[in-house]
Image (cartoon, helix red, strand yellow):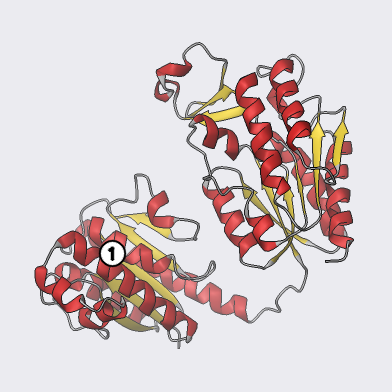
Amino acid sequence: MPTIAILGTLDSKGIEHAFVADYIRARGFDTLLINAGSLAAPAVTPDITAETVAAAAGDSDWQAILARQDRGECVSLMARGAAKIVSELATAGRIQGIISLGGGGGSAICTAAMRELPIGFPKIMVSTLASGNTAPYVGTKDIVMMPTIVDVAGLNRLSRVIFENAAGAICGMVEAAQLRQQQPASDKPLIVASMFGNTTACVTQAQKILEAAGYEVLVFAATGNGGRAMESLIESGLVAGVLDITTTEWADELVGGVLNAGPDRLSAAARASVPAIVTPGCLDMVNFGERQTVPDQFADRTFYQHNAQVTLLRTSPEECAQLGQIIAEKVNAYTAPVTVLLPTKAISVISAEGKPFDDPAADAALFAAIRQHLRPGIPLIEMDVEINDPAFSTACAEALLGNLSQPA
């Protein structure tokens, strides 16, 4: 019978976690209660104690840390210990899913543990913070964050509904995972691809060609978290090739947009020595939120209102020159075969001739910087087409297939 870990600060939220445990057991699953609370005696008896969790953090002075009762210090200690214990339990096959309920401290502790679990492992965090910025809690993993609506502070007519829904969801996720394990695993080599709405046609066409050649293609949205997740998967060693058509996250990283993927974007393929193709897809745009959220320093720049929540800023010639240099220098570090392709008529739907981001000077600066800084020996293919032209997407797919066919 599958076992679901119920991880939480049982010193302050024991009754609520016990309620979830009872519901899960009534559905026919086993449970494992793990206490990550360290500021008081637990309200219920755990299967794994707070002392065990604290000791697992590896700090020789963990007992002194608990004795000081400093909340921040204890949260950090318990997060490290919970991550170690949960990871070991999952690796040993002792748990098949995990759920937690929490406020700020509990969410920090329990999502730290969940981030140590592989993608596909069922994980739900019912949190008072779920309606805000969840990126620090989710990271690059598939953690389901469910809003508590009310605080996790006892059982009432509303919290019971939320907790029952969450418990039912984790049971369903575990059942789905069990069924999935009974299916034969795909033995097709993996290719990862980066995509934005403005490059969808290009990536979709290239994906069809690669899948027809026997590959499985995983497409990641170039939205910051998507780029980080893709980089993480590349570095894991599970990826055969990289179709990096949409490198737009570097525009946000350089200019200060909201969808940046950090300075390591475009680095994993070099570290993992994975064949790749790279294009400057959507480097014409920087993403901000609603128009009023755009910093005043950009007031005289060109904008495009993608929707009510997304405002796009056109990159300038100076920024494009910097981006071209960054892309080239990142690609210069690749050791496996790599090809750079430039669609010189448009790098997105809205930078085509007559469109809102049509800026020949900016595009020229981008392409010139790539040419100038790309090291000799790396193939550079320039095509007088727009990025979503079928000829360009076909060229991207064929270049990647060529790189994949070269000896390691």
Q: Is residue 62 above or below residue 337?
A: below
Point 89% across, 62% down: residue? 405
Residue at far front of view: 376
Q: Is residue 15 above or below residue 243?
A: below
Q: Quadrant of residue 313?
A: top right
As rendered, which of 280 and 329 lies closer to the eye?
329
Residue at far top of view: 300
Image quarter where the N terminus lies is bottom left
> Label 1 amino acid?
Leu
Kindly state the secondary structure of the residue where label 1 is placed. strand
Label 1: which residue? 101
Q: Going by the image, does 184 lie left or right of 337? A: left
Q: Going by the image, does 338 lie left or right of 95? A: right
Point 24% across, 79% down: residue? 60
The number of numbered badges drawn on the structure is 1
Give the crowd class for mark 1: few <14, some 14-19, many >=20 residues within 10 Å: many
Q: Is residue 244 above or below residue 179?
A: above
Q: Quadrant of residue 66?
A: bottom left
Residue 359 at x, y percent in the picture = 70, 16
As rendered, which of 362 and 149 lies closer to the eye?
362
Residue 317 at x, y percent in the picture = 65, 20
Q: Going by the image, does 81 lie left or right of 401? A: left
Residue 93 at x, y percent in the picture = 48, 86
Q: Is residue 153 visible?
A: no
Q: Quadrant of residue 337?
A: bottom right
Q: Is residue 286 visible?
A: yes
Point 58% across, 33% down: residue? 251
As rendered, which of 22 and 264 lies closer to the eye?
264
Image quarter where the C terminus lies is bottom right
Residue 100 at x, y percent in the picture = 32, 67
